[in-house]
Image (cartoon, rainbow, N blue to C red):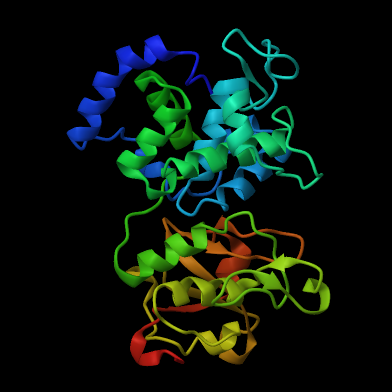
Amino acid sequence: MKAAATICAAVLALPLALVLLLAGKQDPAIGAGPVAGAPTRLARADIPPAYLRWYLDAALTCPGLGWNVLAAIGKIESDHGRSTAPGVKTGENSAGAAGPMQFLAGTWATYGVDGDHDGHTDRYNPADAIYGAAHYLCANHAGQGGKHLYQAIWQYNHADWYVHKVLTQAAAYATPTPAASGRGAIAVRASLHWLGTPYSWGGGGPAGPSYGIAQGAGTKGFDCSGLTQYAWAKAGIQLPRVAAAQYTAGPHIPRTQLKPGDLLFFATDTRNPATIHHVGLYYGRGQMIHAPQTGDVVRISQFTGNPYRERQYIGATRPSTSHSTA
Protein backbone atom coordinates (compact mmCIF):
# COMPACT_ATOMS: atom_id res chain seq x y z
CA MET A 1 0.00 0.00 0.00
CA LYS A 2 1.86 3.02 -1.23
CA ALA A 3 -0.78 5.77 -1.23
CA ALA A 4 1.24 8.31 0.74
CA ALA A 5 4.49 7.55 -1.03
CA THR A 6 3.27 7.71 -4.61
CA ILE A 7 1.54 11.06 -4.65
CA CYS A 8 3.10 12.03 -7.99
CA ALA A 9 1.95 8.83 -9.64
CA ALA A 10 -1.45 9.35 -8.07
CA VAL A 11 -1.81 12.83 -9.52
CA LEU A 12 -0.91 11.56 -12.97
CA ALA A 13 -3.25 8.57 -12.73
CA LEU A 14 -6.20 10.38 -11.23
CA PRO A 15 -7.61 11.94 -14.40
CA LEU A 16 -7.85 8.55 -16.13
CA ALA A 17 -9.42 7.02 -13.05
CA LEU A 18 -12.02 9.78 -12.88
CA VAL A 19 -12.80 9.49 -16.57
CA LEU A 20 -13.39 5.76 -16.21
CA LEU A 21 -15.50 6.14 -13.09
CA LEU A 22 -17.60 9.05 -14.24
CA ALA A 23 -18.24 7.38 -17.57
CA GLY A 24 -19.49 4.32 -15.74
CA LYS A 25 -16.92 2.05 -17.38
CA GLN A 26 -15.58 -0.97 -15.58
CA ASP A 27 -12.72 -3.33 -16.04
CA PRO A 28 -14.06 -6.57 -17.54
CA ALA A 29 -12.81 -8.43 -14.48
CA ILE A 30 -14.76 -6.33 -11.97
CA GLY A 31 -17.68 -8.71 -12.11
CA ALA A 32 -15.47 -11.42 -10.69
CA GLY A 33 -14.79 -9.43 -7.55
CA PRO A 34 -17.93 -8.84 -5.50
CA VAL A 35 -19.28 -12.38 -5.88
CA ALA A 36 -16.33 -14.64 -6.42
CA GLY A 37 -16.66 -18.29 -7.26
CA ALA A 38 -14.51 -21.17 -6.10
CA PRO A 39 -10.71 -21.08 -6.45
CA THR A 40 -9.56 -22.09 -9.92
CA ARG A 41 -6.85 -24.67 -10.52
CA LEU A 42 -4.42 -21.78 -10.95
CA ALA A 43 -5.40 -20.35 -7.56
CA ARG A 44 -5.02 -23.68 -5.79
CA ALA A 45 -1.60 -24.21 -7.37
CA ASP A 46 -0.31 -20.66 -6.82
CA ILE A 47 -1.67 -19.67 -3.41
CA PRO A 48 -0.23 -21.37 -0.30
CA PRO A 49 -3.05 -23.20 1.55
CA ALA A 50 -2.78 -21.07 4.68
CA TYR A 51 -2.96 -17.87 2.63
CA LEU A 52 -5.94 -19.16 0.65
CA ARG A 53 -7.81 -19.86 3.86
CA TRP A 54 -7.02 -16.39 5.20
CA TYR A 55 -8.20 -14.76 1.97
CA LEU A 56 -11.45 -16.74 2.09
CA ASP A 57 -12.06 -16.02 5.77
CA ALA A 58 -11.05 -12.35 5.69
CA ALA A 59 -13.40 -11.64 2.79
CA LEU A 60 -16.31 -12.76 4.97
CA THR A 61 -15.71 -9.74 7.21
CA CYS A 62 -16.72 -7.46 4.33
CA PRO A 63 -20.02 -8.56 2.73
CA GLY A 64 -19.70 -8.33 -1.04
CA LEU A 65 -15.89 -8.33 -1.17
CA GLY A 66 -14.54 -11.18 -3.27
CA TRP A 67 -11.82 -13.28 -1.64
CA ASN A 68 -10.08 -13.25 -5.01
CA VAL A 69 -9.56 -9.48 -4.83
CA LEU A 70 -7.65 -9.92 -1.57
CA ALA A 71 -5.70 -12.79 -3.12
CA ALA A 72 -4.85 -10.74 -6.19
CA ILE A 73 -3.52 -7.91 -4.03
CA GLY A 74 -1.48 -10.41 -2.03
CA LYS A 75 -0.05 -11.83 -5.25
CA ILE A 76 0.93 -8.46 -6.65
CA GLU A 77 2.29 -7.01 -3.42
CA SER A 78 4.41 -9.95 -2.23
CA ASP A 79 3.65 -13.14 -4.20
CA HIS A 80 1.69 -14.31 -1.13
CA GLY A 81 4.58 -13.58 1.19
CA ARG A 82 7.19 -15.39 -0.90
CA SER A 83 8.89 -12.28 -2.27
CA THR A 84 12.41 -11.57 -1.05
CA ALA A 85 12.04 -7.84 -1.74
CA PRO A 86 12.85 -5.40 1.08
CA GLY A 87 9.99 -4.86 3.52
CA VAL A 88 8.07 -8.09 2.95
CA LYS A 89 9.42 -10.04 5.92
CA THR A 90 11.41 -7.35 7.76
CA GLY A 91 12.02 -3.64 7.52
CA GLU A 92 10.30 -1.42 4.96
CA ASN A 93 10.68 -0.81 1.26
CA SER A 94 11.69 2.58 -0.15
CA ALA A 95 8.08 3.77 0.09
CA GLY A 96 7.78 2.76 3.74
CA ALA A 97 5.51 -0.22 3.09
CA ALA A 98 5.90 -3.48 4.98
CA GLY A 99 4.51 -6.99 5.28
CA PRO A 100 2.89 -9.33 2.75
CA MET A 101 0.11 -6.84 1.99
CA GLN A 102 2.51 -3.85 2.00
CA PHE A 103 0.96 -1.53 4.56
CA LEU A 104 2.31 1.90 5.39
CA ALA A 105 2.75 2.35 9.15
CA GLY A 106 0.14 5.11 9.34
CA THR A 107 -2.46 3.15 7.42
CA TRP A 108 -1.77 0.06 9.51
CA ALA A 109 -2.28 2.04 12.71
CA THR A 110 -5.83 2.80 11.57
CA TYR A 111 -6.83 -0.40 9.79
CA GLY A 112 -4.66 -3.15 11.28
CA VAL A 113 -6.54 -6.24 12.49
CA ASP A 114 -5.58 -9.09 14.80
CA GLY A 115 -6.54 -11.70 12.22
CA ASP A 116 -5.26 -14.75 14.08
CA HIS A 117 -6.46 -13.54 17.52
CA ASP A 118 -3.03 -13.82 19.15
CA GLY A 119 -3.42 -10.48 20.92
CA HIS A 120 -1.16 -8.54 18.53
CA THR A 121 -1.67 -6.60 15.30
CA ASP A 122 1.44 -7.14 13.22
CA ARG A 123 1.65 -6.05 9.58
CA TYR A 124 4.27 -8.77 8.96
CA ASN A 125 1.86 -11.45 10.19
CA PRO A 126 0.02 -12.79 7.07
CA ALA A 127 -3.28 -13.36 8.86
CA ASP A 128 -3.27 -9.88 10.38
CA ALA A 129 -2.17 -8.27 7.12
CA ILE A 130 -4.87 -9.98 5.03
CA TYR A 131 -7.63 -9.16 7.51
CA GLY A 132 -6.27 -5.62 7.66
CA ALA A 133 -6.45 -5.35 3.87
CA ALA A 134 -10.08 -6.50 3.95
CA HIS A 135 -10.80 -3.89 6.62
CA TYR A 136 -9.16 -1.15 4.57
CA LEU A 137 -10.90 -2.12 1.33
CA CYS A 138 -14.25 -2.37 3.10
CA ALA A 139 -13.81 1.07 4.63
CA ASN A 140 -13.47 2.30 1.06
CA HIS A 141 -16.72 0.51 0.06
CA ALA A 142 -15.17 -2.35 -1.92
CA GLY A 143 -18.05 -4.62 -0.89
CA GLN A 144 -20.44 -2.55 -3.00
CA GLY A 145 -18.70 -3.68 -6.19
CA GLY A 146 -18.51 -1.92 -9.53
CA LYS A 147 -17.11 1.60 -9.40
CA HIS A 148 -16.83 1.39 -5.61
CA LEU A 149 -14.55 -1.64 -5.94
CA TYR A 150 -12.47 0.17 -8.55
CA GLN A 151 -12.08 3.18 -6.28
CA ALA A 152 -11.24 1.04 -3.24
CA ILE A 153 -8.44 -0.76 -5.06
CA TRP A 154 -7.24 2.56 -6.45
CA GLN A 155 -7.04 3.85 -2.88
CA TYR A 156 -4.82 0.87 -2.03
CA ASN A 157 -2.27 2.00 -4.62
CA HIS A 158 -3.01 5.16 -6.57
CA ALA A 159 -2.60 3.91 -10.12
CA ASP A 160 -5.04 2.71 -12.75
CA TRP A 161 -2.59 0.10 -14.02
CA TYR A 162 -2.57 -1.35 -10.53
CA VAL A 163 -6.37 -1.62 -10.39
CA HIS A 164 -6.48 -3.39 -13.75
CA LYS A 165 -3.69 -5.73 -12.74
CA VAL A 166 -5.51 -6.65 -9.50
CA LEU A 167 -8.81 -7.24 -11.28
CA THR A 168 -7.22 -9.32 -14.02
CA GLN A 169 -5.48 -11.49 -11.43
CA ALA A 170 -8.69 -11.74 -9.41
CA ALA A 171 -10.58 -12.99 -12.44
CA ALA A 172 -7.93 -15.66 -13.03
CA TYR A 173 -8.19 -16.88 -9.44
CA ALA A 174 -11.96 -17.48 -9.24
CA THR A 175 -14.43 -19.42 -11.33
CA PRO A 176 -16.92 -17.12 -13.08
CA THR A 177 -20.32 -16.71 -11.48
CA PRO A 178 -23.09 -17.81 -13.87
CA ALA A 179 -25.61 -15.18 -14.90
CA ALA A 180 -28.81 -15.48 -12.90
CA SER A 181 -31.76 -13.38 -11.83
CA GLY A 182 -34.64 -13.43 -9.39
CA ARG A 183 -34.76 -15.23 -6.06
CA GLY A 184 -32.43 -17.97 -7.26
CA ALA A 185 -29.69 -15.42 -7.94
CA ILE A 186 -30.10 -14.01 -4.43
CA ALA A 187 -29.81 -17.50 -2.96
CA VAL A 188 -26.66 -18.18 -4.98
CA ARG A 189 -25.02 -14.93 -3.90
CA ALA A 190 -25.90 -15.64 -0.28
CA SER A 191 -24.33 -19.10 -0.39
CA LEU A 192 -21.19 -17.91 -2.20
CA HIS A 193 -20.56 -15.51 0.65
CA TRP A 194 -19.75 -18.51 2.87
CA LEU A 195 -17.36 -20.41 0.61
CA GLY A 196 -14.67 -21.98 2.77
CA THR A 197 -16.87 -22.15 5.89
CA PRO A 198 -16.47 -25.44 7.81
CA TYR A 199 -19.05 -28.19 7.57
CA SER A 200 -20.86 -28.65 10.88
CA TRP A 201 -23.36 -31.47 11.39
CA GLY A 202 -26.64 -29.77 12.40
CA GLY A 203 -25.07 -26.34 11.99
CA GLY A 204 -26.44 -23.26 10.29
CA GLY A 205 -29.85 -21.88 9.52
CA PRO A 206 -31.62 -18.70 8.40
CA ALA A 207 -29.41 -16.54 10.64
CA GLY A 208 -26.14 -17.95 9.26
CA PRO A 209 -23.52 -20.41 10.49
CA SER A 210 -23.83 -21.87 13.99
CA TYR A 211 -22.44 -24.62 16.16
CA GLY A 212 -23.92 -27.97 15.27
CA ILE A 213 -24.76 -31.11 17.23
CA ALA A 214 -23.05 -34.47 17.80
CA GLN A 215 -19.85 -34.43 15.72
CA GLY A 216 -20.62 -30.83 14.76
CA ALA A 217 -20.93 -29.55 18.33
CA GLY A 218 -17.46 -28.00 18.35
CA THR A 219 -17.61 -26.52 14.84
CA LYS A 220 -19.33 -23.32 13.75
CA GLY A 221 -20.56 -23.64 10.20
CA PHE A 222 -23.22 -25.23 8.01
CA ASP A 223 -24.43 -28.65 7.11
CA CYS A 224 -25.98 -29.16 3.68
CA SER A 225 -29.57 -28.24 4.55
CA GLY A 226 -28.49 -25.47 6.92
CA LEU A 227 -26.72 -23.78 4.01
CA THR A 228 -29.69 -24.07 1.65
CA GLN A 229 -32.06 -22.89 4.36
CA TYR A 230 -29.87 -19.83 4.93
CA ALA A 231 -29.48 -19.05 1.23
CA TRP A 232 -33.17 -19.19 0.47
CA ALA A 233 -34.07 -17.25 3.62
CA LYS A 234 -32.01 -14.41 2.14
CA ALA A 235 -34.21 -14.74 -0.95
CA GLY A 236 -37.34 -14.39 1.20
CA ILE A 237 -38.38 -18.04 1.36
CA GLN A 238 -38.40 -20.15 4.52
CA LEU A 239 -37.42 -23.78 3.99
CA PRO A 240 -37.78 -26.73 6.36
CA ARG A 241 -34.58 -27.61 8.23
CA VAL A 242 -33.73 -31.06 6.86
CA ALA A 243 -32.95 -32.05 3.27
CA ALA A 244 -35.74 -34.63 2.89
CA ALA A 245 -38.32 -32.05 4.00
CA GLN A 246 -36.89 -29.40 1.68
CA TYR A 247 -37.64 -31.74 -1.23
CA THR A 248 -41.31 -30.72 -0.91
CA ALA A 249 -40.61 -26.97 -0.71
CA GLY A 250 -41.26 -26.05 -4.32
CA PRO A 251 -42.24 -27.46 -7.69
CA HIS A 252 -40.01 -30.18 -9.10
CA ILE A 253 -37.86 -29.03 -12.02
CA PRO A 254 -36.68 -31.20 -14.93
CA ARG A 255 -32.92 -31.42 -15.09
CA THR A 256 -32.92 -29.79 -18.53
CA GLN A 257 -34.54 -26.68 -17.03
CA LEU A 258 -32.28 -26.12 -14.02
CA LYS A 259 -31.48 -22.53 -13.08
CA PRO A 260 -28.97 -21.17 -10.54
CA GLY A 261 -30.38 -21.48 -7.04
CA ASP A 262 -32.52 -24.57 -7.68
CA LEU A 263 -32.11 -27.24 -5.01
CA LEU A 264 -30.49 -30.52 -6.03
CA PHE A 265 -31.25 -33.63 -3.97
CA PHE A 266 -29.40 -36.90 -3.50
CA ALA A 267 -30.76 -40.10 -1.98
CA THR A 268 -29.58 -43.55 -1.02
CA ASP A 269 -32.56 -44.99 -2.89
CA THR A 270 -33.63 -42.74 -5.77
CA ARG A 271 -37.07 -44.37 -5.74
CA ASN A 272 -37.68 -43.27 -2.15
CA PRO A 273 -37.54 -39.54 -1.19
CA ALA A 274 -37.40 -40.55 2.48
CA THR A 275 -33.77 -41.63 1.90
CA ILE A 276 -32.62 -38.16 0.76
CA HIS A 277 -29.41 -37.37 2.64
CA HIS A 278 -27.89 -34.41 0.79
CA VAL A 279 -28.91 -31.14 -0.85
CA GLY A 280 -27.04 -28.41 -2.70
CA LEU A 281 -27.80 -25.29 -4.73
CA TYR A 282 -27.39 -25.46 -8.49
CA TYR A 283 -24.65 -23.06 -9.54
CA GLY A 284 -24.60 -23.54 -13.29
CA ARG A 285 -22.56 -25.54 -15.79
CA GLY A 286 -23.24 -28.80 -13.96
CA GLN A 287 -21.91 -27.51 -10.64
CA MET A 288 -23.45 -27.02 -7.22
CA ILE A 289 -22.68 -25.03 -4.08
CA HIS A 290 -22.93 -27.24 -1.03
CA ALA A 291 -21.61 -28.20 2.39
CA PRO A 292 -20.38 -31.75 1.64
CA GLN A 293 -19.43 -33.55 4.86
CA THR A 294 -17.60 -33.41 8.19
CA GLY A 295 -14.03 -32.23 7.69
CA ASP A 296 -14.88 -30.36 4.50
CA VAL A 297 -15.98 -26.79 3.79
CA VAL A 298 -18.67 -25.02 1.79
CA ARG A 299 -17.50 -25.30 -1.78
CA ILE A 300 -18.48 -25.44 -5.45
CA SER A 301 -18.34 -29.00 -6.80
CA GLN A 302 -19.13 -30.75 -10.05
CA PHE A 303 -22.18 -32.97 -9.89
CA THR A 304 -22.78 -33.55 -13.60
CA GLY A 305 -20.57 -36.46 -14.62
CA ASN A 306 -19.63 -37.28 -11.02
CA PRO A 307 -20.49 -41.01 -10.74
CA TYR A 308 -21.32 -40.83 -7.03
CA ARG A 309 -23.62 -37.83 -7.40
CA GLU A 310 -25.17 -39.05 -10.64
CA ARG A 311 -26.01 -42.39 -9.07
CA GLN A 312 -27.76 -40.73 -6.12
CA TYR A 313 -29.42 -37.78 -7.87
CA ILE A 314 -33.17 -37.94 -7.20
CA GLY A 315 -34.35 -34.59 -8.53
CA ALA A 316 -34.50 -30.81 -8.13
CA THR A 317 -36.94 -28.23 -6.84
CA ARG A 318 -37.30 -24.48 -7.17
CA PRO A 319 -38.41 -23.02 -3.84
CA SER A 320 -41.40 -20.72 -4.10
CA THR A 321 -43.49 -18.56 -1.79
CA SER A 322 -46.48 -20.88 -2.27
CA HIS A 323 -44.49 -23.71 -0.68
CA SER A 324 -42.75 -21.61 2.00
CA THR A 325 -42.96 -22.79 5.58
CA ALA A 326 -43.29 -19.20 6.82
When asked about the image quadrant of residue 125, the answer is: top right
Residue ID at (58%, 55%): 195
Q: Position of residue 33 (x, y in %)?
A: 43, 42
Classify the position of the N terminus by image quarter: top right
Q: Judge from the rendering whether residue 41 lies leftward or rightward of residue 223; answer left or right.
A: left
Classify the position of the C terminus by image quarter: bottom left
Tell me, yes or no, if residue 109 can be seen here.
yes
Q: Judge from the rendering whether residue 271 lies leftward or rightward of residue 211; answer left or right.
A: left
| Residue situated in front as seen by the camera: 74 or 261 | 74
Q: Is residue 255 above or below residue 1?
A: below
Q: Position of residue 19 (x, y in %)?
A: 20, 26
Tell me, yes or no, if residue 104 can be seen here.
no
Residue ID at (46%, 23%): 157
Q: Position of residue 15 (x, y in %)?
A: 24, 20
Q: Is residue 324 above or below residue 222?
A: below
Q: Judge from the rendering whether residue 128 lies leftward or rightward of residue 102; answer left or right.
A: right
Q: Position of residue 302 (x, y in %)?
A: 54, 57
